[in-house]
Image: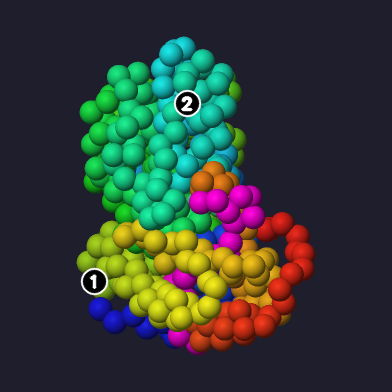
């Protein structure tokens, strides 16, 4: 299947502003159809979900459509799709709910590779329950987090293991299937942070063995909200605090207050847009084809960038794992990555510097809280963007500014 990046780009009004965007891991640009769907839902007659008035049916239909779309994208069950404000909020909520089932002496595993949104909620939840926290550590030399690294900290008392599907700092994609096998053999739950992964590859949450799989539509061309796809059988057993009149059905049990219908409509539109980049068949089949085509496209651009960056003096590439997303973390010897960020920005090339909330990973790599320059590819990235990036990086290392200060990295 050929991938027509020019046709893709034509759908993104933001690209007409002229920047070359390598900031997708922090949040992607949005196609016109997503904006249209958000607006149409906001200005349509709408009420709380119900089946009596047209306005109620619109709200209800919007929710059900978004669940179907996410189930297709993630290879998950519709009844397991929980919407929330962000992955961070959902993970805090789930951590508190799941921790109600823990006893003092139980154990919880987090990793050094993960974004803090899949670390800190579990740290607090473990503390509150009197559970012991264990760390799975990746190899800073290779960037790999192996199944053995996780197995090493599993015991008969392990109740939950939280692992990223892909690092938003260095792109590492741990072998989730193998890890899931070990986690389940230990009798524990497997919580996967799929936020960075879902934007770049076909996902099959069920086949990966995730009991709960979190993602954020704003990373894959959609609006700013979060989603957890849970195994319905598991969700039935979990009991979050709830308002008395609120339904106890799943997934509604986990969705506090009135849902953001317009964002859900935008999420459906984003998934339909992605599916439109695939070939034939069901939406699920078209999504798998489209995400494979995007993966191939992004990897080709990634190889171009890597080959060139390796020739630049004094540049270290921290993204080294065998299997990874098209996300490169760079440092520049004595030159500050924040200066590279600012230098590139002055040329309208957006590639931010920081540790992007992957604080543990950045520290584990020896990069402290400062991190590096992150280059992320997206479905709309093209060769011209790459030319501009490589030109800018070349100029920077050959005499761009050496020092200076810039406010802390703005995002995640
Ligand atoms: C890997 C990863 N996990 C979690 C998050 C947090 O997602 P949200 O902004 O939806 O809370 C991010 C955001 O950058 C991320 O990259």
- The answer to whether one can see residue 47 in this image is yes
In 3D space, how far apart are the residues under numbered discs 1 and 2 (Cα atoms)? 47 Å
**Magenta stretch: includes residue 84:** no
- The image shows a total of numbered marks equal to 2
Tag 2 or tag 1, which sits nearer the N-term?
2
Q: Which residue is mark 1?
A: 280
Which element is circle 1 on? loop
Q: Which residue is mark 2?
A: 133
Instruction: Give me the residue at 65% from left, 70% from top.
Output: 335
Percent across and percent down for residue 204 are 29, 51
Which element is circle 2 on? strand
Main SS of residues in magenta: loop
Can you say whether 324 is above or below 314 in the image?
A: above
Question: Label 2: few (<14), some or many (≥20) within 10 Å?
Answer: some
Percent across and percent down for residue 328 are 48, 66
- The answer to whether one can see residue 261 in this image is no
Question: Label 1: few (<14), some or many (≥20) within 10 Å?
Answer: few
Q: Nearer the viewer, residue 267 or 157?
A: 157
Q: Is residue 295 left or right of residue 373?
A: left
Q: Is mark 2 within 8 Å of ligand 1?
A: no
The magenta-colored residue range is: 365-384
Q: Is residue 61 left or right of residue 28?
A: left
Can you say whether 277 is above or below 65 in the image?
A: below
Instruction: Give me the residue at 75% from left, 60% from top.
Output: 407
Q: Are marks 1 and 2 in contact (CB under 8 Å)?
A: no
Can you say whether 386 is above or below 328 in the image?
A: below
Percent across and percent down for residue 17 are 65, 81
């Amino acid at each position: 299947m050929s991938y027509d990046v020019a046709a893709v780009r034509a759908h993104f009004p933001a690209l007409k502003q002229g920047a070359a965007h390598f900031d997708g891991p922090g949040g992607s640009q949005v196609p016109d159809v997503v904006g249209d769907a958000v607006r149409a839902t906001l200005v349509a007659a709408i009420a709380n979900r119900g089946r009596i008035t047209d306005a109620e049916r619109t709200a209800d239909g919007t929710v059900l459509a978004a669940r179907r779309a996410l189930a297709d994208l993630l290879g998950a069950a519709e009844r397991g799709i929980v919407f929330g404000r962000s992955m961070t909020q959902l993970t805090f909520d789930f951590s508190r709910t799941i921790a109600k089932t823990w006893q003092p002496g139980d154990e919880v595993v987090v990793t050094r590779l993960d974004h803090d949104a899949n670390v800190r909620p579990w740290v607090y939840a473990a503390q509150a329950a009197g559970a012991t926290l264990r760390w799975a550590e990746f190899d800073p030399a290779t960037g790999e987090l192996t199944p053995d690294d996780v197995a090493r900290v599993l015991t008969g008392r392990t109740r939950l293991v939280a692992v990223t599907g892909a690092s938003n700092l260095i792109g590492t994609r741990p072998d989730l299937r193998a890890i899931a096998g070990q986690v389940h053999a230990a009798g524990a739950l497997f919580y996967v942070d799929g936020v960075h992964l879902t934007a770049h590859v076909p996902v099959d949450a069920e086949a990966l063995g995730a009991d709960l799989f979190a993602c954020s539509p704003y990373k894959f061309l959609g609006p700013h909200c979060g989603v957890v796809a849970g195994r319905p059988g598991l969700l039935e057993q979990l009991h979050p605090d709830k308002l008395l009149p609120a339904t106890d059905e799943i997934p509604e049990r986990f969705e506090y207050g009135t849902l953001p219908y317009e964002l859900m409509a935008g999420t459906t539109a984003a998934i339909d847009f992605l599916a439109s980049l695939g070939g034939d068949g069901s939406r699920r089949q078209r999504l798998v084809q489209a995400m494979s085509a995007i993966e191939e496209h992004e990897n080709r651009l990634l190889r171009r960038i890597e080959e060139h960056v390796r020739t630049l003096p004094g540049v270290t590439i921290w993204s080294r794992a065998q299997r990874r997303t098209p996300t490169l973390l760079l440092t520049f010897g004595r030159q500050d990555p924040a200066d590279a960020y600012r230098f590139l920005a002055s040329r309208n090339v957006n590639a931010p510097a920081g540790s992007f909330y992957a604080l543990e990973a950045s520290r584990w790599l020896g990069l402290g809280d400062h991190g590096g320059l992150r280059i992320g590819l997206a479905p709309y990235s093209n060769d011209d963007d790459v030319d501009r990036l490589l030109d800018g990086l070349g100029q920077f290392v050959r005499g761009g500014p050496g020092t200076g200060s810039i406010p802390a990295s703005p995002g995640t």
